[in-house]
Image (tube, rainbow, N blue to C red):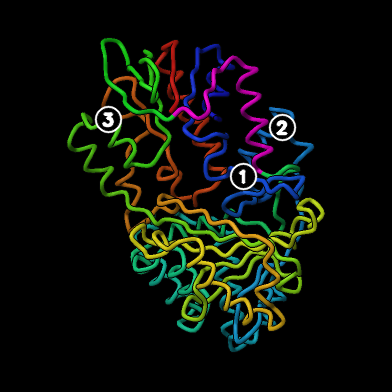
Amino acid sequence: MSAAYDLARAGQQVQVFESASAAGGLASGFRDEAWSWPLERFYHHIFTTDKAIIELAQQIGFADRLFFRSQITAQWWRGRGYDLNGPMQVLRFPGLPFPDRVRFGAVAFYLKYLDADWRRLERTTAAAWTSRWAGKNVYRLLWRPLLEGKFGPHADEVNMAWLWARIRARSFKLGYFVGGFQGFSDALLAAARRAGAQVQLDAPVAQVAQVQGGWEVTVRGAQPERFDQLLVTGAPGLLTKLVPQLPAGYLGQLSKLRSMGAVVLTLALTQPLTGGLYWVNMPKDQFPYLALVEHTNFIAPEHYGGDHLIYLGDYLEPSHAYFSMSHAQLLAHFLPSLQVVNPAFRPEWVRKSWLHREPYAQPIVPVGHSAHIPPLGTPLPGLFWASMSQVYPWDRGTNFAVELGRKVASEMLERGLSALHAV
């Protein structure tokens, strides 16, 4: 959508085919009849450092709907969540001896505020780097659970540049939009259309074919359409499926881009759960999920009919059992853990629940990963690819999706062709 907006504003003829019924991708929302605001399928917020999406919100006239608030992000340890949002909170954390707390704070300060060469950092794993500089206690209690939660069996492969970028981009205040990220996505969709882009929702692309002078795109149930340039913005596997005639070397690069999937169970509770915590990192040897997010400790329950909204989320290999278990099975599997979080919890607190799953949600980034990322322009003339696999070293998210979309639009414009297409 960011690419379509820029290309249309530059006077190009733009056609977007979106397979879903709403714009937004992984940031799209859903709505319950009791709510005035939609809610993201997968928990979302932005940081004060997220310049690309803030600038775009200003350009499309949506900046007055963006706000930032303080919240509490915690680490679960011995039966409760401990706030680790600032230096004083870290120094008071009883899970580590005082020298280790100081060491953790010093390393976090270095990664957050001092210039570091991320290309140098990607030569080593996050496990090795944090063990060496923060110490084995800090690694075992804080860094290792994060890496295992995000990357599962691939935790020891993840390079240090990814962890540096994750810390570097974070801010203590988090941002959200009036009407949620679906509100922002809808505003961007409207802005792209005002600029002249044609956007079709519920329009899954069934086939693309290289033709003389460009590309032919066929949406399921429709006649083929021709374009000079084509931008695919899905997973590596989608590009491989749509354009199997890509050179073998390029397809080999795509096949090496591995990723984790996401499973999120969202609960509407009649009572608050965590006592004011927004985000709690949960140890996966004790809980069946990585993160517990009480969204309504960040955004008031009044926007959701008084519901207290809880996300229970995890990053898993697409082959994991959570991707095949039914909604009822996952609910039964997750609910007992909530009584550990709050002994007063009862299953009767659950008014309603929703399950969302995506197999392509978190790219895996091993040592030397930058050498394996394909460029935005593919070897085939007029064909471009932009995905969360290419925002590296930054972690995937809405800000870097916007940044990448605008970057690929600039590259497409440089080719000087007039008819463009985004999938």
| Figure quadrant of the C terminus | top left
Which residue type does callout 3 highlight? Val
Q: Nearer the viewer, residue 165 or 400?
A: 400
Q: Of label 1 and label 3, which has the lower sequence position?
A: 1
Query: Which amino acid lies under the numbered mark 1 shown in the image of this protein?
Result: Gly
Circle 2: element type: helix
Q: Which residue is mark 1?
A: 29
As drawn, 37 above or below 155 = above
Residue for badge 3 = 243
Residue 88 at x, y = what percent?
72, 76
Query: Residue at point 76% right, 69% down?
Result: 271
Q: Nearer the viewer, mark 1 or mark 3?
A: 1
Q: Is residue 78 above or below residue 119?
A: below
Q: Position of residue 296 (x, y in %)?
A: 74, 60
Q: Is residue 233 left or right of residue 24?
A: left
Q: Over which residues does the magenta segment extend?
A: 181-203
Whole-number angstrom distance, CA of label 3 to CA of label 2: 36 Å
Write down the quadrant of residue 299 in the picture: bottom right
Residue 58 image label: 2
Mark 1 vs 3: CB contact within 8 A: no
Mark 2 belongs to which amino acid? Gln
Question: Mark 3: few, some, or many residues within 10 Å (few <14, many ≥20)?
Answer: some
In space, the residues marked 1 and 3 are separated at their CA atoms by 30 Å
Side (left or right) of 349 relative to 388 = right
Give the crowd class for mark 1: few <14, some 14-19, many >=20 residues within 10 Å: many
Decide whether residue 183 is among the magenta residues.
yes
Q: CA distance from mark 2 to mark 1?
A: 22 Å
Identify whether 380 is placed above or below 391.
above
